[in-house]
Amino acid sequence: MSTETFSTSKSSLQPADRAPGVRQDRPAPTVVDMGILSRSLAFHVRKAQLALQRRGLRSMSASGVGPAEFGTLVLCEQNPGLAQFQIAAALDIDKASVVAVVDRLEELGWVVRRRSSQDRRRYGLFLTPSGAQQTQLLRQQAEQAESFALELFSGAELQQLLTLLGRLA
Amino acid sequence: MSTETFSTSKSSLQPADRAPGVRQDRPAPTVVDMGILSRSLAFHVRKAQLALQRRGLRSMSASGVGPAEFGTLVLCEQNPGLAQFQIAAALDIDKASVVAVVDRLEELGWVVRRRSSQDRRRYGLFLTPSGAQQTQLLRQQAEQAESFALELFSGAELQQLLTLLGRLA
DNA sequence: TATTGTTATACTCTATAACTATA
DNA sequence: TATAGTTATAGAGTATAACAATA
């Protein structure tokens, strides 16, 4: 049996006599019970995202290219002439955030903005040749960064995970 | 057939003659092809997290209680006397970040820090009576905020989603 | 020497509001 | 009036590095 006890905090905001119901004289836990967190969707999604970020996505951000930049490149590749508000809708971020993303990509010389002749409020976004080249490279890096999932999941499991996540969003 | 064209961007960094391979004179896309993003785990996890955040989690943060605070309360409830570094490990955040979280909870009078007698470097964290009450309330809110998932998924699907996400982390 | 809690700092990502030019 | 892009600002949320106290 443990005889561990706990004495009052350094903080004077909560002296012992102002927290009369707090139980003491218990051993400090060694195995952590996650309680409801083990059944919380938000908690699991957050941990999964952290794990993915720490994995290979850091390799991209080293070159100043984050998820939003990568997504924009892929969308421009698949849909030449896409407008910025369409990028925002597809990536689920605000159109104001897209401005800085496209600014960076344009500075890198990977993307160009061209005014639409039909609606002069819009820019059409296009990959430059070097942008197309970089996109191909980054896509390979992204695929490799996610390839570890192929060891964690069967093909059917991976497919269902994507399906279920898609239903959430 | 569309006759839409695109003229040069306002930015002088990328004049037309420095991006010679960019294709023009194409109609602006209306349906967006997500390309590889539709099969990207990181992309789907990120969108799912955004959807969850926008849903009910905002209701908590209105009271200054975010996911980290909620997780800490639940952990303290299930494991009285837990140390801060154990909170950090369980929630997958840095121990430095836990300090501010516990500070807030202590200011609210929901949690108290007590020095361990066995290892005087550590604090044991305990819920106060009002902290226990608030935790129960917040847990109900969290369960309700995630209850929409019960309409999106069958019990088996929800269970598998949690299992697969857990395998990622 | 290593660990626990702390402080200070900075970075990433995103949202909000107000503005402009076009529609 | 509404929409597309822009600007400026601010807010989460987290990481990193260095430090004091303790092990």
Image (spheres, coloured by chain):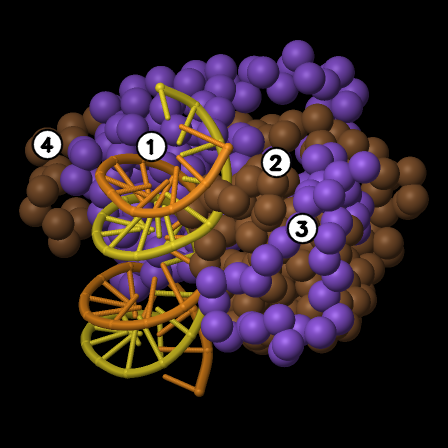
Chain colours: A purple, B brown, C yellow, D orange
**What residue did someone put label 3 on?**
A5
Q: Nearer the viewer, mark 3 or mark 4?
A: 3
Query: The N terminus of chain A is located in which quarter?
Result: top right
Query: Identity of the amino acid at label 1?
Result: Ser
Vertically, is B4 above or below A18?
above
**What residue did someone put label 2 on?**
A48
Q: Position of residue B118 (x, y in %)?
A: 60, 41
Q: Looking at this view, name the residue that lies furthest to the right.
A: B155
Q: How would you rate the neighbour count of disc 2 (Cα within 10 Å): few for under 14, some for 14-19, many for 20 or more?
A: many
Query: Identity of the amino acid at label 2?
Result: Ala
- Marks 1 and 3 on same chain: yes
Which circle marks residue A61 in the picture?
Answer: 1
Query: Identity of the amino acid at label 4?
Result: Arg
State how far apart marks 4 and 2 are (Cα). 42 Å
Q: Residue at x 49, y 20 (%)?
A: A145
State how far apart marks 1 and 4 are (Cα). 26 Å
What secondary structure is marked by label 4?
A: helix
Q: Residue at x 92, y 44 (%)?
A: B155
State how far apart marks 1 and 3 are (Cα). 46 Å
**What residue did someone put label 4 on?**
B18
**Chain ID of residue with mark 2:** A
Q: Nearer the viewer, mark 3 or mark 2?
A: 3
Q: How would you rate the neighbour count of disc 1 (Cα within 10 Å): few for under 14, some for 14-19, many for 20 or more?
A: some
* CB under 8 Å between discs 1 and 4: no
State how far apart marks 3 and 2 are (Cα). 36 Å
Q: Position of residue A12 (x, y in %)?
A: 48, 72
